[in-house]
Image: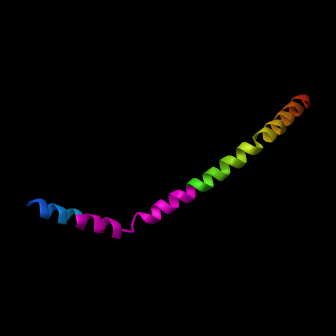
Amino acid sequence: MIPTGGKHSLLAGAKALAKRFAADQSGATMVEYGLLVAMISAAIMGTLLSISEEIKTDFNYISENLGKAK
């Protein structure tokens, strides 16, 4: 809680709040996991985008040949 009894107590409260915030490590792990998920997602998207035309060609080939088999 930040004291509100004047200029000096407000400054002391702000310093105490900043120290608590700097010492808090509870959110660091969540941020690291978020960054890891973002990097993995970017790698998956890059891979899918690079092979998407090949996959499209393969599916069209299969579709055409299945249509002929009827």
Front position in the image: 33 or 60 = 33
Helix, strand or loop: magenta stretch: helix
Residue 1 visible from this viewpoint: no
Front position in the image: 38 or 59 = 38
Asked if residue 54 is positioned above or below residue 10 in the image, the reply reads above
Q: Kindly identify the residue that appears in the image at 83 percent across and 33 percent down.
A: 60
The x, y position of residue 47, in whole percent, is 72, 49
> In the orientation shown, which residue stands out farthest toward the right?
69
Left or right of 37, for residue 2: left
Left or right of 42, for residue 5: left
Q: Which residues are magenta?
A: 15-37
> In the orientation shown, which residue stands out farthest toward the left?
5
Q: Kindly identify the residue that appears in the image at 87 percent across and 30 percent down.
A: 64
Q: Where, by quadrant of the figure, is residue 53 drawn?
A: top right
Asked if residue 54 is positioned above or below residue 39 in the image, the reply reads above
Q: Kindly identify the residue that appears in the image at 18 percent across and 62 percent down.
A: 11
Front position in the image: 56 or 68 = 56
The x, y position of residue 36, in whole percent, is 56, 59
Left or right of 38, for residue 17: left
Residue 32 visible from this viewpoint: yes
